[in-house]
Amino acid sequence: MATTGTLTETTFDHDVIIVGGGPAGCSAGVFTARAGLDTVIYDRGRSSLKRCAYLENYLGFPAGIDIETLYDRIQDHAETAGCTIVSELVDSLDRTDDGEGFVVETQDGEPATTRRVIAATRYDGEYMRGLDDDAAMFETYEHDGEERETFDRGYADADGTTPVPGLYVASPSEAADMQAIIAAGRGGRVARRVIAETRLDDGWWEAVADGVDWVRREAELDDEWTERATWVEYFDDRHAEDAPVEPDSDRFQRVRKAALDERRSSYLTSDEIADRTETGQEALAGYLDPAAVVSGLDQTAVLDAMDDKTIRNYLGASDGRAEVSE
């Protein structure tokens, strides 16, 4: 069971529920799950990405990539980060009785409760109807002489926050609904705000709530920065004066410890970098179709571009390539 933190006794099934498992939803899920939030992604709607014939402007694929392969990869990434993906269509959202969270109702499954919801479906926000004044959340337009309603794509702020506490919108959005790569960026931005507000609920304050989800080389640290005392001094110099609590309070020291643990764990040794690089390359090799690789490059060039251990793992050979030059 997930909770909202130390400042409330309310318990929910999950910390975050994301509606939509395309680029925006999975990108958001990667960030929230990596931040330790129990994250579920519901994905069984009309994906706009799946309507594309082929994708040629998603960074990292110079010749483009077919939609099914990309969709599988982004969902695999979300699951690897710690998300649970549920193939159910969200029918409606309602506030919990105490008003602190949401009840997510699906067409086929059991309802689930969560403190925060990220909307990440492009087409409409009909399932959100009733959470706010419909006049604010929806706008009217005329089509073929008839007046219709649609979700207001300007309803959410740039970081995804809305007038409804705990509800964030990555999509529908004016900023992110036309290109997959922009949608992915929007999802990540919204997720960072969700993470920050989760920390605020847990006693952090705005100046320290924003995390940075990227890693650095440990070799870049000077000797003094390998000591925790240096980091403590740095944190106190930067935040103690403007903190909403006294530096000797339990709250300040708890937040300082959590923030510094996060920062210090982001530095990797050379061995850790090498291990992660090898694992990443092996995972990438596993996504490739051998026939497509061979047809695109001659076998010698392919093998020469890969390290010997990756070749053995990929091809299933026990003793490597016979003619590899050591």
Image (tube, rainbow, N blue to C red):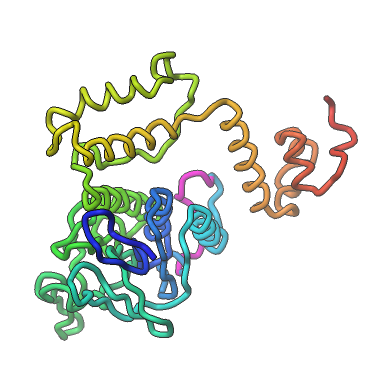
- Residue 54 lies in the magenta-colored region: yes
Q: Tell me how many marks there are.
A: 0
Q: Residue furthest top?
A: 223
Residue visible at 27% across and 76% down in the picture = 93
Left or right of 167 in this view: 273: right
Left or right of 52 in this view: 286: right
Residue visible at 41% across and 65% down in the picture = 40
Residue 239 percent across, percent down from the top left: 19, 30
Residue 310 percent across, percent down from the top left: 73, 40
Q: Quadrant of the N terminus?
A: bottom left
* Magenta stretch: helix, strand or loop mostly: loop
- Residue 201 lies in the magenta-colored region: no
Nearer to us in this view, 160 or 293:
160
Nearer to us in this view, 237 or 116:
237
User: Does residue 111 lie above or below 153 as drawn?
Assistant: below
Hey, which quadrant is residue 147 in on the image? bottom left
User: Does residue 34 lie above or below 268 as drawn?
Assistant: below
Q: Which residues are magenta?
A: 51-61
Residue visible at 26% across and 35% down in the picture = 253
Hey, which quadrant is residue 23 in on the image? bottom left
Left or right of 252 in this view: 304: right
Nearer to us in this view, 191 or 56:
191
Q: Quadrant of the C terminus?
A: top right
Residue visible at 38% across and 37% down in the picture = 262
Residue 154 percent across, percent down from the top left: 17, 61
